[in-house]
């Protein structure tokens, strides 16, 4: 029998290795930026076209390479960082495996121009699919310029799996932030499609954070510091009230390398446990300096995951450092039993007459009667109105007819991110809704008794459906009236978020937001919807853009639906409490006007009905 095991050709082996290191354009950006940092550069430019599909270019003013090194650097396992195995335990540089450039060259067209300061001429090298096409002297500036073109040209399957330009550029932007944040002594420039998005000058760490994420971060950041024999911790944490539902601003660096470590992140989040709601994540920018011999960073090709020799010890130090920073800034709620606010007063001027305080009481106060602040509130109808109207379901009949099926379950295979589309009802199809008996629970659930059933409506979800369809109508043919502001408010966003806001500005104007770009990252809000009472436009716009960016993968071809969904989710809990019978009936009528009254745009149930059998089962069966 003949032999069946063969050595893979170098080209195939390089493509397989490239699949581990270069997963998307952002992976190439990471490797090239880290090489530029390791070269000793003080200025680094990242130039991108078409989210990396057409061009990824990194230009630096580092030490450059010789004629021979420029060719050797594209070979696998060729590196200047290691000389022996022991060097793996004292790594301070970014790259060391010697796989990055070989992997990129295997799946793209790469042009390298490089020159050392003491050389008269530089070198130009062209590589296509690991094959050297040209290697010759050239006149160029000191440093190196790597231009990666036609990424995945010989791996079409990988190219077909790339997401939209917005998604891919978002990943590239994130890699840029990770390198620029930890190396604040280097000047960085980010250019996308010939448009300069960021131009960062050398600065301190706090200023670098502000330059990237916006001036509104200036008042959010608080320093933290702890130094022990095992670890030195420094950086900034953000106020608890600035926590978000997604981990968009969590940056942890170990020995100037961005890392993802569940235990260390958990140590930080645990310190905030009593200060932020469940499901929210705090923002932080933290450095850890640890002895390289106690870290293993050679556990993944991307070098983002690390292992620590004594994770529990580092966990304790980090958790204590964050708690100390929070406590020293008196962010933790404190009780002072010896202080009575009633005795707080300002200094009185001389000869000011004193006034004897009056103590009054309400003789009719009864603590056992239902108060407005109770979590359970009933309608203000007479005590006998329930009995009088219980057998008169004419209004209920009309209401329930409009609901396709109030016990509707989600369709098979539907998840929380898909939308079911129904035709909107015409005015003739909308019946009169006349509900006279209702109970409100915690301003969240509306309970409607009907014959032997209880219909429960989730008010925020219902409001989300109402808002969603009203926003779609506004963007189609019924724009919202803009209330112009006497004193426009200024909003500052990061470069990536600012680009998104410029893209969706026409649609937001139809929703009542008059937004004017002041410069690259600052915007003036000249007007807001007349029905809105926005107290913090900075947070509103920032959270909305973040949500839009996250949902762009699911709705990349449906911009208006994405905008309507994000805005509806953000404002669904702002509905004022339903106080009167008229308000309840108006709310139910608006819900019934929607294309579907049963589920939210993202697939969550709005209405649920409990039958007599359901109620009986709670108490042990039908004979209870």
Image (cartoon, rainbow, N blue to C red):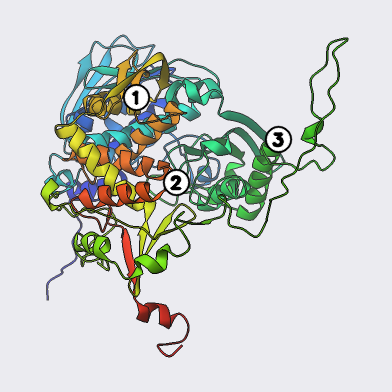
Q: Where is residue 287 in the image (x, y as percent from the top left)?
A: 57, 35
User: Quarter-wise, where is residue 95 in the image?
Assistant: top left
Q: What residue sits 43% from the left and 24% below the top? A: 212
Q: Distance between the residues labelled 1 and 3?
A: 35 Å
Q: Which residue is drawn at 20% across and 33% down?
A: 474
| Circle number at residue 427 | none
Q: Is residue 253 visible?
A: yes
- Marks 3 and 2, how far apart at CA: 34 Å
614 to 174, vertically: above or below: below
Front in this rendered view, residue 114 or 241? 241
How many marks the image carries: the answer is 3
Task: Please report the residue visible at 37 percent of the width from the left and 40 percent of the height from the top.
Answer: 571
Q: Position of residue 438 (x, y in %)?
A: 40, 59
| First in residue order: circle 1 vs circle 2 | 1
* Nearer-N-terminus badge (1/3): 3
Residue at label 2?
A: 577
Task: Identify the secondary structure beneath mark 2.
Answer: loop
From the viewer's perspective, tell me whether residue 585 is left or right of residue 306: left
Residue 67 seen in the current view: no
Please give the residue where the numbered disc 3 appears in the rendered image: 330
Q: Position of residue 617 (x, y in %)?
A: 42, 82
> In the rendered image, which residue does mark 1 sit on?
528
Task: Tell us which disc is closer to us: 3 or 2.
Answer: 2
In the picture, the quarter occupied by the N terminus is bottom left
Q: In this view, does 336 lie above or below 35?
A: below
Residue 622 placement: quadrant = bottom left
Q: Depth check: 210 or 114 in front?
A: 210
Q: Is the residue under label 3 in contact with that under label 1 (CB below 8 Å)?
A: no
Q: Nearer the viewer, residue 570 or 39?
A: 570
For label 1, count other residues whose C-alpha is less than 10 Å away and answer few (under 14), some (14-19) or many (20+). many
């Amino acid at each position: 029998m003949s032999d069946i095991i063969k050595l893979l050709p170098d080209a195939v082996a390089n493509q397989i290795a490239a699949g581990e290191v270069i997963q998307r354009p952002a992976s190439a950006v990471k490797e090239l930026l880290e090489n530029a940092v390791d070269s000793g550069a003080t200025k680094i430019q990242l130039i991108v076209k078409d989210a990396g599909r057409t061009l990824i270019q990194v230009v630096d003013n580092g030490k450059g390479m010789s004629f021979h090194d420029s060719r050797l650097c594209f070979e696998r396992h060729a590196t200047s960082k290691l000389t022996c195995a022991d060097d793996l335990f004292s790594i301070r540089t970014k790259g060391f495996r010697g796989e990055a450039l070989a992997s990129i060259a295997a799946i793209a067209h790469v042009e390298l121009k490089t020159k050392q300061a003491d050389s008269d001429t530089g070198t130009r090298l062209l590589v296509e699919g690991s094959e050297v096409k040209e290697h010759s002297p050239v006149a160029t500036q000191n440093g190196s310029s790597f231009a990666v073109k036609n990424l995945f040209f010989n791996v079409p399957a990988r190219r077909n799996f790339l997401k939209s330009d917005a998604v891919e550029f978002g990943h590239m932007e994130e890699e840029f932030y990770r390198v620029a944040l930890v190396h604040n002594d280097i000047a960085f420039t980010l250019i996308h499609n010939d448009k300069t998005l960021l131009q960062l000058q050398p600065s301190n760490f706090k200023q670098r954070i502000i330059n990237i994420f916006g001036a509104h971060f200036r008042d959010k950041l608080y320093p933290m510091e702890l130094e022990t024999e095992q670890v030195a911790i420094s950086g900034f944490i953000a106020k608890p009230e600035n926590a978000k539902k997604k981990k968009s601003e969590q940056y942890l660096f170990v020995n100037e390398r961005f890392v993802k470590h569940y235990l260390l992140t958990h140590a930080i989040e645990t310190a905030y446990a009593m200060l932020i709601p469940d499901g929210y994540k705090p923002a932080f920018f933290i450095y850890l300096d640890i002895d390289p011999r106690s870290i293993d960073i050679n556990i993944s090709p991307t070098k983002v995951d690390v292992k620590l020799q004594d994770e529990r010890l580092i966990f304790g130090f980090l958790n204590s450092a964050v708690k100390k920073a929070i406590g020293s800034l008196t962010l933790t709620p404190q009780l002072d039993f010896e202080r009575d606010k009633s005795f707080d007063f300002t200094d009185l001027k001389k000869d000011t007459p004193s006034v004897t305080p009056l103590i009054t009481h309400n003789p009719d106060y009864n603590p056992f009667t239902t108060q407005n602040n109770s979590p359970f509130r009933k309608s203000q109808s007479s005590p006998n109105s329930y009995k009088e109207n219980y057998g008169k379901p004419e209004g209920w009949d009309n209401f329930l007819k409009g609901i396709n099926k109030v016990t509707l379950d989600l369709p098979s295979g539907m998840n929380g991110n898909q939308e079911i589309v129904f035709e909107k009802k015409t005015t003739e199809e909308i019946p009169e809704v006349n509900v006279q008996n209702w109970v409100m629970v915690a301003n969240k659930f509306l309970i409607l008794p009907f014959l032997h059933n209880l219909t429960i409506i989730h008010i925020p979800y219902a409001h989300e459906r109402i808002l969603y369809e009203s926003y779609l109508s506004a963007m189609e043919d019924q724009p919202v009236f803009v209330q112009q502001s006497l004193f426009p408010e200024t909003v500052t966003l990061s470069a990536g978020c600012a680009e998104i806001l410029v893209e969706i500005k026409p649609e937001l104007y139809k929703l009542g937001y008059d937004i004017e770009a002041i410069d690259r990252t600052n915007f003036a809000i000249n007007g807001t919807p007349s029905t809105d009472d926005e107290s913090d436009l900075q947070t509103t716009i920032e959270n909305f853009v973040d949500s839009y960016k996250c949902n762009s993968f699911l709705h990349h071809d449906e911009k208006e639906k994405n905008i309507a969904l994000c805005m509806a989710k953000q404002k669904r809990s702002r509905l004022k409490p339903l106080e009167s019978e008229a308000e309840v009936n108006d709310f139910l009528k608006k819900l019934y006007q929607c294309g579907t009254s049963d589920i939210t745009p993202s697939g969550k149930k709005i209405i649920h009905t409990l039958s007599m059998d359901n109620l009986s089962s709670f108490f042990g069966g039908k004979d209870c």
